Amino acid sequence: MNNTLTRRTLMGAAVTASIFAAGAVSAQETFKVGAINPYSGPLALYGNEVTRGYELAADAINENGGVLGKTVEIVKGNATNPQEGISAVEQLATRDNVDVLIGTYLSSVAGAASETALNYNKLYWDTNALASVLTERGLPNFVRSGPYSVSFAQVSVDLILDSLAGKLGKAPSDLKVWIEHEESVYGSSIAEYQKEQLEEAGVQVLGVGAHSYKSIDLTDSVLRAKDAEPDIWLQTGYVPDSNLLLRTAENQRFDPPVKVFVGTGDTNETLEALGEEGVEGLLVVSYPRPDVSEEFGPGSDAYLEAYRAKFDQDPVAPQSMAAFVGMKIMAETVNEAGNADPAAVAEALPKMEKPEGTYETGFGVDFNDNKQNVRAHPTVIQWQGGNQVTVFPEVAAQGSQMLGIGN
């Protein structure tokens, strides 16, 4: 009897041990997401902010069972330029063996990194890069869940035609606009679309200026715009050049009736650089912020609470909420596909259709043939009394948030 009990005890212990061992393996299984962004240099603040959105999304995804039953883990890949993007992908794909790659604050990095990812048959899911060419390439492994340059350009045009013209008391044909942009594929693609659409509507485009976002002197760019005497100064860039343009405009006493910046100008870094008076009235076409109405972006209030709880501060920039939503859509799509293989994900995309207003940013889901989500749109904020207030479209604005003209 003692021998029987001993055998049974040992068998039971062996079974229990095997169960615990299996459970330990399962618990250790992770779904690795390689996040490609600038984590050093002048844009590190924003690369980290995008990745904060991924981290918040990972928390939410893991609370709901993870991706393919695995715990999501974020692995960072630092890339401040295209060559570093290539190196980051090679390292993440080989050394870290990530399941998918996600990004990207810089469009030029996204282009090089996604092509490299194709060499390893890795899905490259983009939440924040804006250049149109990224989806126009038809790369089989590239998907973009967020808005792109056409979306930003279109909203800037809609703002001018549907709101600013009336507030300035002018017909579109009487409006005078100067377009300025940073010279990479990001700024150029937006400026080209703006010029085409505005001129088609009869707006007078007085000129188009281009500059490097790394410039240390943008006096010539400002003086060209000032000499043209526009009603609206329409500018697309990154944080360093946008802040420099605003400071230079102030020094050169260039104060057009309306300033519309695209993609940047809506962060505390700009407020600190220019001061409350220096940004007052500035309009910025950018990613939806957590202050959008719950009607427009259900769950935006909860997102803000989660951000504050995790990072003990308010969001540094709105890009993080778009990254948060984009990663959630990625997780849903991979779960639908049953694996992260680019071909399987591409096949699952048509099944993911959701109406606008589904997510915290107001995004819906509808991927076109180029795997671009066409139900993801930016919004417009205005600096008012040192605060950033969503003012356009009206459905995104809170009741008391109204667009004003004049500094």
Image (spheres, grey):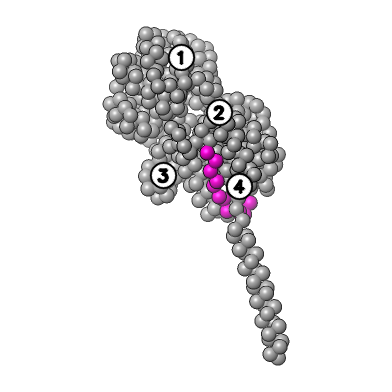
Return the residue nearer the eye: 135 or 160: 135
The image shows a total of numbered marks equal to 4
Q: Mark 4 touching mark 1, by CB under 8 A?
A: no
Return the residue nearer the eye: 35 or 147: 35
Foreground: disc 1 or disc 2: 2
Foreground: disc 3 or disc 4: 4
Q: At which x and y percent is residue 341?
A: 68, 43
Residue at 57% across, 34% down: 85
Which residue does the numbered mark 3 point to in the structure image?
304
In the rendered structure, which disc, 1 or 3, sits on the residue that comes first in sequence? 1
In the rendered structure, which disc, 2 or 4, sits on the residue that comes first in sequence? 4
Q: Can residue 332 be seen in this snapshot? A: no
Q: Which numbered circle lies on residue 96?
A: 4
Q: Which numbered circle lies on residue 108?
A: 2
Give, as a single range, the part of the protein colored magenta.
Answer: 68-78
Within the image, what quadrant is residue 344 found in? top right
- Label 3 – label 2 distance at C-alpha: 30 Å
In the rendered structure, which disc, 3 or 4, sits on the residue that comes first in sequence? 4
